[in-house]
Image: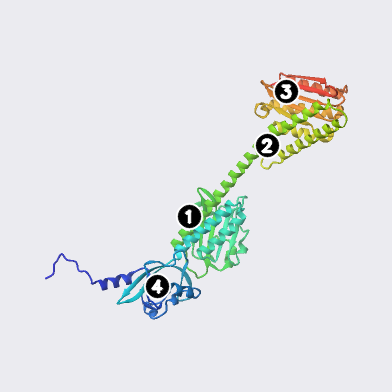
Amino acid sequence: MSDPGATDTPEPGRLLGAIFSASPDAVIVIDSSGTIVLSSPAVTTLFGYFPEELVGEPVEVLIPAARHQAHTAHLQHYFGSPRSRQMGDGLELSGRHRDGQEFAVEVSLAPVEVRGLRFAAAFVRDGRERRRAIDRVNAVNEVTQRILAGDDLSEILPLVANRARRLSNSRAVWVVTPDGNGALTISSADGPGTEVLLGTTLSAETSRSAQVMQSGESAVIDDLSNAENVPSAVTTLDLGPGLYVPLIADTRRLGTLVLGRANGEAQFQPIEIAFAEVFATSIAAAIENGEVRAELERLETASDRERIAFDLHDTVIQQLFAIGMSLQAARATVAGRGVERIDAAVNGLDDVIREIRNTIFRLPGRSESARGLRDEMFRIGDKFADDLGFTPRFAFHGPVEASVPEVVSEQLLQVLTEGLSNTARHANASQVEAVITVEDGWLRLSLSDDGIGISNAPSAGQGLRNLSTRAANLGGSCSVAAREPTGTIIEWAVPL
C-alpha cells in the first residue's frame, strides 16, 4: 500500500524528455563530426524544420553558407576543449531558416558525454529582438553624434527616416514636421518611390499626423493604401500596414514619424510599436538636446565676443591712444625727419585703432543691447570720416556705458554730431580727438582739433550756441576756446 503523503515523481529520463520538449529555445545536439543527432520541437518555430528532418543532417544546414568554413574551425576547437559557454561571445551570430532567410541568433553550448562519446548541445534563441534593441541604441547614438557635431536638422531627418525604416522592416518611412507657417510638411522620406511625398503640405489641425502629435499617442493603420486622412501620394507606394508615432520631447511636439510596410506584410505588433515609440522618443530628445546645446554655445560665444569687445574698448584702444598722445607730445621736441617718422607712427596707430573698432563692430552675434554709447560715438565718427578726410580718434575714461543715463547719452551724441559737423565745415583740420570721461558724478566731453581755430561764420556760431543750450538744459556747462598752437577745443560737461 502506497504512502498517501508521498508525491509521484517521474523517472529522471522521462522528466528530462519533457523539459527538452518544452524548452522555448531550440535545442540541437550534434556529435563531434557536426552531425545532428537530436533536436527539440522548438526548431520548427525557429528554423522551419521538423525535429526528425534534421537528424542525420550536418549542422551547417542551419547556418548561412558564408559562415560554413569558420563554423567548421570553431567546431573542431570546441570539441578539442569542450566547456559550457556562450558561443561567439562578442560576435554577431546568424541562423538560416528553411526558406533561406538569415536572422540573428544567440547560442549557448554545453558538452555532453554518453558512454564515452562526446556530444555538444546547442541552445539556440531568436536574437532578432535583441539585435533590434542594439541597432536602435546605435541609431540613436549615431543621430545624437551628428546633432552634437552641429549638423543641420535637414541633414539629420533623412538619417532618422533611413534608420527607422531599417529597424522596423518597413518599406517606406517619412517624417512630418511643422513648417513654420502654421502647417505641417513631409520634410524627409526614405524608401522606394518615397520622393513623391517630399514637400507635401498637411493640415496642422485635421491631418492624421497632427492628430497623433496632439494626442501624443501612436496610431496603427490596417491598410495605408485605402486609409482615410493620409497624403494622397501614399496610394502610389503600394503600402499596407502603417504606424504613426509622435516625435515628442517633454511637452514639445517636434513632428510625426510614419512607418509603412508593403501590402500583404504583417501588421505592426505591440513589441514593434514599443520599439518604434522608444526610438522616436529618443530621437526627439536628442534633437531637443542638440537645439539646447546649440543655443548655449551661441550664448556662450556671444558672451565671449562681448567680453572681447569690451576688453578691446577699455584696454587695447586706450593704450594705443595714450601711445599716440605721447608721440604727439614728443613731436614738439624733435625736428627734421624725426617729425615725419612720428607723424607716420601716429597715423599707423590711427589705422590700427580703426581696424580694431571695425573688428569689434563686425563681431557676429553681438547683441543690440551691447551696442551702447561708445559704439554709437564710433559710428558718428565714421559717418563724418569722408567730410573730415580722416576718422576722429576717441578715448574713454571711467564707466561710460554703466553710468550714463539715456537722456544724457542722447544729448552727448547730438553734441558730438554738432561738433564734428562744425569741424568738417569750417576747421580745415587734419585730426580730431574726442575724450569722454565719467568721474565724480560728471560726464565730460573734450573735443579738440588742429584746424584754423574758432570760426566767425554765423552757422558755426549757431552750432556752438546749440552745444551750450544742451549743456544748460542738463544743468551743465560748455566752453569753446582756441587750442595751442592751432585749432579749437570744446569742453562740454553735465552732471549725471
Q: Amino acid at mark 1?
A: Glu
Crowdedness near tag 1: few (<14), some (14–19) or many (≥20) residues, C-alpha within 10 Å:
some
Image quadrant assignment for residue 418: top right
Disc 3 residue type (three-letter)? Arg
Amino acid type of the residue tagged 4 in the rendering:
Gly
Q: Residues within 10 Å of mark 2 (few under 14, many from 20)?
A: many
Q: Residue furthest left?
A: 1
Disc 1 to disc 4, how far (Cα)?
55 Å
**Horizontal and vertical percent position of residue 430:** 85, 30
How far apart in space, not on screen, are marks 1 and 2 (Cα)?
50 Å
Q: In the rendering, which numbered label is found on residue 309?
A: 2
Q: Nearer the viewer, mark 3 or mark 1?
A: 3
Secondary structure beneath dot 3 equals strand
Give the distance between the C-alpha atoms of the residues marked 2 and 3, in whole angstroms.
23 Å
Q: Quadrant of residue 127?
A: bottom left
Q: Earlier in the sequence, mark 1 or mark 2?
A: 1
Is residue 193 rendered to the left or right of residue 420?
left
Placement of 324 over or under 441, stated as above or below: below
Residue 217: give its label.
1
Q: What is the CA distance from the residue labelled 3 to the residue labelled 1?
A: 67 Å
To which residue does mark 4 refer?
Answer: 80
Q: Nearer the viewer, mark 3 or mark 4?
A: 4
Which of disc 4 and disc 1 is earlier in sequence? 4
Query: Residue 232: x and y, percent?
Result: 59, 63
Specify the label residue 444 is tagged with: 3
Asked if residue 206 shows in the view, the reply is no
- Relative placement, left or right, of 470 versus 75 is right
**Camera-nearest residue between 181 and 52:** 52
Q: In the image, 118: left or right of 71?
A: left
Q: Mark 1 or mark 2: which is in front?
A: 2
Going from N to C along the chain, the mark reached first, 2 or 4, is: 4
- Residue pictured at 58% horizontal, 52% vertical: 147
